[in-house]
Image: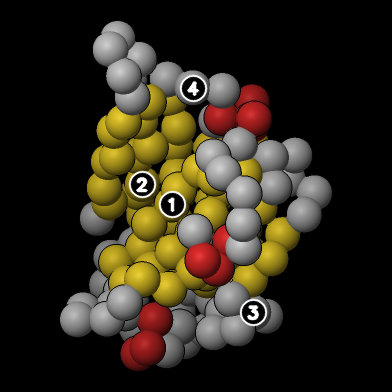
């Protein structure tokens, strides 16, 4: 499972490619990856969201551009670990002790503006 997000203007083509996921049993763990290209990945904060079937978008995690500051949503705090490797233009999110409520589509995003991560 995974997805690809493309944006840009003219010849500029910025891409985020997500990978990982798939079916898991309750109590298992999952590791998700977000690969960036076409832009300076290390200049942007990364956010992770998820959306359950028929549900609204839920903010999960934030990691600043340096990887020094991390924040988590209440539903995953204590179970999620976000990281990044700017040399590989990549961010990862691990979620442990899975519960049925974790069933969702997961998305990564780069933060290009200001504001509360939970509202972006």
In which quadrant of the rendered view does residue 4 lie? Answer: top left
Q: Secondary structure at mark 1?
A: strand
In which quadrant of the rendered view does residue 98 lie? Answer: bottom left
**Cα distance, mark 2 to mark 3?**
21 Å
**Cα distance, mark 4 to mark 1?**
15 Å
Q: Residues within 10 Å of mark 4 (few under 14, many from 20)?
A: some
Labels 4 and 1: the sequence-earlier one: 4
Labels 4 and 3: the sequence-earlier one: 4
Q: Is residue 79 visible?
A: no
Name the residue tied to disc 1. 108
The picture places residue 84, in percent across and down from the top left corner, at 63, 44
**Cα distance, mark 2 to mark 1?**
7 Å
Query: Which residue sits furthest right?
Result: 68
Q: Secondary structure at mark 3?
A: loop
Mark carried by residue 39: 4
Name the residue tied to disc 3. 77
| Residue in the picture at 60% in, 83% down | 74
Rendered view: 87 above or below 26: above
């Amino acid at each position: 499972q995974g997805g690809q997000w493309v944006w840009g203007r003219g010849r500029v083509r910025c891409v985020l490619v997500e990978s990982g996921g798939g079916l898991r049993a309750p109590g298992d763990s999952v590791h998700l990856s977000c690969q960036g290209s076409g832009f300076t990945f290390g200049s942007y904060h990364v956010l992770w969201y998820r959306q359950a079937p028929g549900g609204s978008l839920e903010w999960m995690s934030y990691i600043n551009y340096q990887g020094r500051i991390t924040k988590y949503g209440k539903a995953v705090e204590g179970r999620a670990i976000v990281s990044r490797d700017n040399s590989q233009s990549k961010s990862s999110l691990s979620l442990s002790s899975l519960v049925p409520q974790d069933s969702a589509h997961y998305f990564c995003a780069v933060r290009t503006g200001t504001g509360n991560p939970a509202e972006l």
